[in-house]
Amino acid sequence: MTHHDPSPAPLTSVHHLRHPLIDHHLALLRDRATEPPEFRLLVQRLAMLLAYEATQDLSLLPIEVHTPMTYTTGHVLRERVGLVPILRAGLGMVDPLLQLIPTAEVWHLGVYRDESTAQPVEYYSKIPETGPVDVGLVLDPMLATGGSINSAIAALKSWNVPRIKVLSIIASQPGVEAVQSRHPDVQIFACAIDPELDARKYIVPGLGDAGDRIFNTRRG
Ligand code: PRP
Ligand code: URA
């Protein structure tokens, strides 16, 4: 009998998180009146919720645990997880991720957008050439055109990281499409997918400049 396998599920996946806590914290994060101290806390809370969702498929190793009552089997993380924050704004997501995955490695990547062209410029990379992690989590609260994320993914691919996930608080629809078309194997997790970019390639409605709001460097 001829047997036709069903088409494999596409590897590409965009996970738009839906949860009342996400809506609540996101509304406060977007508010222009939210000052940097609270903005940072909101980024941390949303990053934790993204981390919870994005790490569902991490594999585990059984271990024997001696409780005060008896022996039982517990499970601990088996895989090497690498956090790759894109400087600057991605730094705001590192601590909450380390709260949940204390054994994660942090590999910094500096990318900024040239203000006149919105093209990404890589200016710093701690990513080594050998010994890749098992799972790479790219951290950046904003995925606008997708240029910076695509540049980070390319860096992780040249390090031969087999599983790459992007954690962004706000992504734009065109940015998601730009990442998906270049890297269909990479999963994207976002708390919101906003419809468009303005003429300066800022996300609308968005939240403005995430790096400036985290680090209190907003001018004017
Ligand atoms: C912002 C943001 C992303 C990037 C998103 O960084 O944190 O890294 O822009 O835009 P893209 O998807 O169009 O590439 P920015 O360039 O402002 O750097 P900074 O945080 O160092 O100021
Ligand atoms: N970078 C930001 O911080 N915000 C945007 O809306 C776009 C790029």
Image (tube, rainbow, N blue to C red):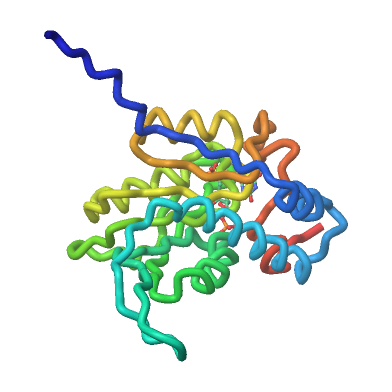
Q: Nearer the viewer, residue 165 or 63?
A: 63
Quadrant in the picture for residue 41: bottom right
Picture coordinates of residue 135 (x, y %)? 33, 56
Q: Nearer the viewer, residue 198 or 169?
A: 169
View extreme (top): residue:
1
Picture coordinates of residue 220 (x, y %)? 82, 57
Q: Please indicate whether residue 1 sits to the left or right of residue 9 in the image.
A: left
Picture coordinates of residue 150 (x, y %)? 41, 42
Q: Nearer the viewer, residue 219 or 129?
A: 129
Residue at 75% over, 38% down: 205
Q: How many marks?
A: 0
The vertical placement of 163 against 179, above or below, is below
Quadrant in the picture for residue 214: bottom right
Residue at 67% over, 29% down: 195
Q: Please indicate whether residue 200 sits to the left or right of residue 33 in the image.
A: left
Picture coordinates of residue 156 (x, y %)? 31, 53
The vertical placement of 173 against 161, above or below, is above
Residue at 84% over, 52% down: 32
Residue at 53% over, 73% down: 99
Q: Quadrant of the N terminus?
A: top left
The vertical placement of 55 against 149, above or below, is below
View extreme (right): residue:
33
View extreme (front): residue:
69
View extreme (left): residue:
1
